[in-house]
Image (tube, rainbow, N blue to C red):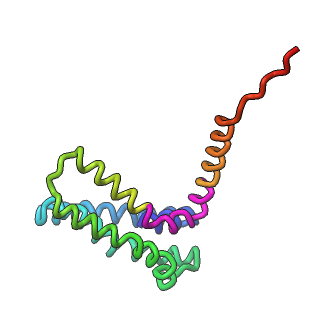
Amino acid sequence: VHALATVTSVLGKRLRVGVIMLVSGLLQVLLAFVLGRRYGLVGIPLAALITQAMFAIPLLLSPLAALTGLTPRALVPTVAAPWARHSLPMLAVCAVTGILVRDVPLWVAIPLGVAAAGTYVVMARRLIFAYAPVAEMFRTRLAGLRTAVTLAWARPERPPVQ
């Protein structure tokens, strides 16, 4: 939803995206109350998932296609499928881990989250680094790092003795 809304609004449909997101947020809050009462804490993210899948995504696809020519039929194999192929296995592992290891102390949960994030970055690295802005950022940072390391290891020149 974020990707669809961002691209669509940046390309000129800000008002439409704003209205869709506002109504989606209202529906999400209402559904979170209902599902939260019915299913407890699990109902709240479930409300977000349902609202975005049933309301926001379908309404954002039309203006995206009009602005970019990227139809929903083309969006799935070119964008959604590669990300799903990398994301769904890690999402499944995290979901199962979350169900099995419910009441872990914070000092255990934080490293587990960091490990999961690191593992996901490794799994999706080809998609992440193929994205031009990310690739350029890393090229720039690595070039600066190489320069800093080179300067740190270089012997300073001594001024000539007079």
- On screen, residue 2 versus residue 101, left or right, reads right
Q: Is residue 113 above or below residue 148?
A: below
Q: Is residue 123 magenta?
A: yes
- On screen, residue 77 versus residue 43, left or right, reads right
Q: How many discs mark residues in the rendered view?
A: 0
In the image, farthest residue toward the front = 161
Quadrant placement of the C terminus: top right
Q: Is residue 110 magenta?
A: no
In the image, farthest residue toward the top = 162
Q: Quadrant of residue 123?
A: bottom left
Residue drawn 63% across the image and 54% down it: 139
- Give the overall secondary structure of the magenta segment: helix
Q: Position of residue 142 (x, y in %)?
A: 61, 50
Q: Quadrant of residue 48?
A: bottom left
Q: Is residue 82 above or below residue 45?
A: below
Residue drawn 40% across the image and 73% down it: 57
In the image, farthest residue toward the left = 38
Q: Position of residue 41 (x, y in %)?
A: 17, 59
- On screen, residue 159 versus residue 19, left or right, reads right
Quadrant placement of the N terminus: bottom left
Q: Position of residue 80 (x, y in %)?
A: 44, 76
- On screen, residue 159 versus residue 116, left or right, reads right
Magenta residue span: 122-137
In the image, farthest residue toward the bottom = 73
Q: 38 and 93: which one is in front?
A: 93
Q: 101 and 7: which one is in front?
A: 101
